[in-house]
Amino acid sequence: MIKSFTAGLLGGLLLAGFAHADVFISVDAKGSYVLSNVHRPGRHYERVIREAEVAQVSLDQQPQMIAARPYAELVSAAATANQLPAALLHAVIQAESSYNSGATSPKGAGVDAVDADTARELGVKDVYDPKANIQGGAKYLKRLMTLFDNDIALAVAAYNAGPQAVISRGGVIPPFAETQRYVPSVLRQYRRLQGLAVDAPL
């Protein structure tokens, strides 16, 4: 009976926060089901989900999540060409423009909000062309990843505040209010698209 109950519980367990642990089930004296991610000594539990199985569910969902994002093919191609995770490029685009190719700000324009000077340096002739902008943004992000030894947080901070703002402070995220909001937002979205826990190491 417990095993037949397992399938119906899977979706609820994932939503309940057991996505990164084994899940055990038992029946108490009143006949109610008791769920736990901890196997307590002296109690009889049956393991119904193993950590690896739940992780696989998340990994299976991750490609679909990315494929459903706007400009998915353009982002995938730019990420591959620059050896970047597509999820990271999507997270930056989400933070910069929410995929609005006509977005403008004092710092930049287009999907990846590449600034005019950087665009010229990267050979981006039209920042409002999504393909060119995404390719330019990916090249710039890869350059920052290389500069900061693949430290995603610092590369993302530099994308927002400029690399000199990070370097001049000894390699820490600058204390600018915008950057302090921007970096966690990008990292949160990146982890979500990667199917990672909110506090998973990068």
Image (tube, rainbow, N blue to C red):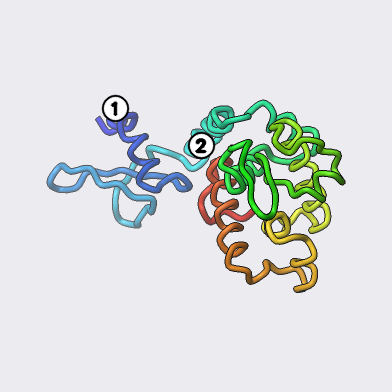
Q: Earlier in the sequence, mark 2 or mark 1?
A: 1
**Residue in front for this viewpoint, 22 or 59:** 59
Secondary structure beneath label 2 = helix
In contact (CB < 8 Å): disc 2 and disc 1 = no
Left-right relation of 9 to 191 = left
Crowd class of label 2 (few under 14; some 14 to 19; many from 20; radius 10 Å):
some
Vertical side of 144 occupied by 47: above or below: above
Horizontal and vertical percent for residue 109?
A: 68, 45
Horizontal and vertical percent for residue 161?
A: 70, 61
Q: Which mark is residue 138?
A: none
Residue at the (67%, 40%) spot, across then down? 110
Left-right relation of 62 to 138 = left
Crowd class of label 1 (few under 14; some 14 to 19; many from 20; radius 10 Å):
few
Horizontal and vertical percent for residue 42?
A: 30, 56
Residue at the (73%, 59%) spot, across then down? 158
Residue type for callout 2: Ser
Secondary structure beneath label 1 = helix
Residue type for callout 1: Ser
Left-right relation of 139 to 200 = right
Outermost residue toward the left in this view: 30
**Residue in front for this viewpoint, 2 or 137:** 137
Q: From the viewer's perspective, is the residue at label 2 or at label 1 nearer?
A: 2
Q: Quadrant of the N terminus?
A: top left
Horizontal and vertical percent for residue 181?
A: 56, 61
Q: Which residue is mark 1?
A: 4
What is the spatial separation of the Cα atoms under label 2 and label 1, in whole angstroms?
22 Å
Left-right relation of 172 to 191 = right
**Residue in front for this viewpoint, 166 or 86:** 166
Residue at the (63%, 69%) spot, across then down? 176
Residue at the (69%, 29%) spot, across then down? 74
Q: Which mark is residue 58?
A: 2
